[in-house]
Image (tube, rainbow, N blue to C red):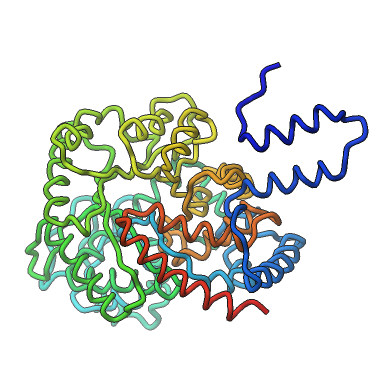
Amino acid sequence: MAVPLQRPHVVCVLLCCLTTGLSIPDPRQREALIKQEASMQTGGQVVLTDAEQRLDDLLVKMKQEEMAKADFPPSMHFFKARDLIRSSPIFSLLQKMPKGGALHLHDLAIVDVEWLVKNVTYRPHCYMCLTDDRSIRFVFSSQQPKPLLHCSTWMLLEDLRAKMANVTDLDNSIRGNLTLFTDQDPEVAYPSQDVVWKIFEQKFQALWGLVTYVPVFKDYFYQGLSEFYVDNVMYLELRVLLPELYELDGCSYDKAYTLKTYQDVTKQFRANHPDFFGMKVIFTVHRQVNASVMTGVVEEAMKLQKDFPDFMAGFDLVGREDSGKPLWYFRDALSLPADRGVPMPFFFHAGETNLQGTEVDENLLDALLLNTSRIGHGFALPRHPLAKDMSRRRGVALEVCPISNQVMNMVKDLRNHPAAALMSEDHPMVISSDDPGIFGASGLSYDFYIAFVGFGGIRSHVGSLKQLAINSIRYSALSQKQQEEALALWQTKWNKFVSENAF
């Protein structure tokens, strides 16, 4: 009988069991198998210090208590579980934990919506209109803006609020138009992927004019860095559309200006927070464009990469995979950098689908054929054994965003997320939060909580958390030297965290 391909040491243990007979199982062999399997998980090879072991003992007790509760957050929709997570002692500990980097984030969705409502929409010259499909749009203007197609007359929010005795309802309405989070039953509000994706994209359209006004853009991005910094994230890689920023008089700037603005604000933030390691951007375009447009965008990306070599990490496509064009459709345009000998790392979204066997489902293989540096989401990877093997052998990490996958109706119970099985075999992966502002979250701790408590169950431990944090630096777009510097800084933070929390 042929023995399936396994790790060599596991095969040896199994053969040992087969040759000694199975009529009376040997407890020692059983214990050896359990230990071998535990050593295969993410962080399974990490040797804990005495202080880390004490912290782990504390976390095991916390996790046992959490898992024994009737309302177990990873089994519930995040919108229902958020308050339970916030009250969890494990979550409080994870907020303090240095998590390394967040490598899968989108430009207009990194800031808590509450800040946008209370800060940005109360600024002078902020106009709002209501669209035919019950969404909203914003613009800052020194005079009455020109009418927008399929939108009501522009209303100056300053005047509108002045006429109201109570502005709470208006603020709540604006807030609801900028986030998917709802107090309603989320399965009723968003019954299918088609529905949730349509509403999700409306949120970005509503955010666009609000955030791309130059003074707001600078404050918004600084606020985003602040929220991740407070959550003990020391490095970001941000997927950006590089929108044309505009001024109060309506004049606008090109993509290079936007990229330079990102760079300048990052420098300012680092100057004010010396223990923040920095940020890089991944230039993106929507996957709905045609082949000729993609060719022009890739040309532009190569020029920006040349002009901002230390700040721009590479290129990706964004938007819903199921309704967008597959990577193979763009193969000629995406081959241009390699054909011209221009370094252009790719960080492709791939496998964010449940549609097995479709053209879209082949994005995982095509991403690897196009030499992607990482895979965004990779939700479908376990259904592709060849792609799974290739990504492991090449060290192409998955950017796993658990809460995003649940909110977007990929999976209901996060204990059943495909990454749980991948984590049990230490497949290359990092944890990120995708669009925390739109999901009613912030920073990275919510997704780390799901990965630690939901994916890992009782078996995951401090070594798992430590490995995931290290992965976020090792699989980043930082140079080898920068990675070593970032790891040294992270290790100092980690040692301090462990010493302060290991009782």
Q: Position of residue 311 (x, y in %)?
A: 22, 59
Say if residue 88 shows up in the picture. Answer: no
On screen, residue 17 versus residue 468, left or right, reads: right
Residue at 38% in and 83% down: 165
Residue at 65% in and 49% down: 39
Residue at the extreme top? 1
Which of the two residues, 132 or 410, is positioned nearer the viewer here? Answer: 410
Q: Position of residue 4 (x, y in %)?
A: 64, 25
Picture layout, residue 347 above or below residue 110: above
- Figure quadrant of the C terminus: bottom right
Kindly indicate the quadrant of the structure image that contains residue 2: top right
Residue at 87% in and 44% down: 27
Residue at 11% in and 48% down: 303
Q: Position of residue 419 (x, y in %)?
A: 55, 45
Picture layout, residue 236 above or below residue 377: below
- Figure quadrant of the N terminus: top right
Kindly indicate the quadrant of the structure image that contains residue 217: bottom left
Picture layout, residue 352 above or below residue 38: above
Which of the two residues, 301 or 129, is positioned nearer the viewer here? Answer: 301
Which of the two residues, 422 or 395, is positioned nearer the viewer here? Answer: 395
On screen, residue 362 versus residue 332, left or right, reads: right
Which of the two residues, 102 or 425, is positioned nearer the viewer here? Answer: 425
On screen, residue 465 versus residue 156, left or right, reads: right
